[in-house]
Amino acid sequence: MTGSPPDPDPAVTPGLEPGGGVAPGETPPDSGQTSGVSMNESGSSRRVAPMVIFGIIMATIVLLFVATGALLLLTMTGVLH
């Protein structure tokens, strides 16, 4: 089953001048249009939490690496026995 096109037929639409224009003071005919969001965009808030968790894990690994390096350096220089 085929639906009718969203735009009105200019041959049978009142108020149109020859060539498809609209006379001053006339309201142009409605045509089909799509507006708004076509898909749910709630997935963007879900992606923030994994990125925050990943950042916390990476910061912890970097801090452990720096602390281990500092401990080794202090042990090698004799500050810690």
Image (cartoon, grey):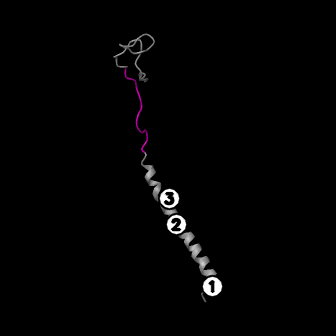
Question: Could you say where residue 53 lies in the image, as x and y percent from the top left?
Answer: 48, 63
Q: Is residue 44 above or below residue 4?
A: below
- Circle 3: is it few (<14), some (14-19), or many (20+) Cα within 10 Å? few
Residue 30 belongs to the span the image colors magenta: yes
Q: Are marks 2 and 3 in contact (CB under 8 Å)?
A: no
Residue 51 marker: 3
Residue at the spot of label 2: 57
Q: Secondary structure at mark 3?
A: helix
Instruction: Tell me which segment is drawn in magenta.
Output: 29-40
Q: Secondary structure at mark 2?
A: helix
Residue 75 marker: 1
Q: Which residue corresponds to the image point at 41% horizontal and 29% vertical from the top-left?
A: 33
Q: Is residue 23 above or below residue 5?
A: above
The quarter in which the C terminus is drawn is bottom right
Question: Could you say where residue 64 lies in the image, as x and y percent from the top left?
Answer: 56, 74
User: Which callout, 2 or 1, points at the residue further toward the start of the chain?
Assistant: 2
Amino acid type at circle 1 is: Thr
Question: Could you say where residue 52 lies in the image, as x and y percent from the top left?
Answer: 48, 61
What secondary structure is the stretch in magenta mostly built from?
A: loop
Viewer-nearest residue: 74 or 45? 74
Amino acid type at circle 3 is: Met
Residue 72 belongs to the span the image colors magenta: no
Quadrant hosting residue 39: top left
Question: Could you say where residue 28 lies in the image, as x and y percent from the top left?
Answer: 37, 19
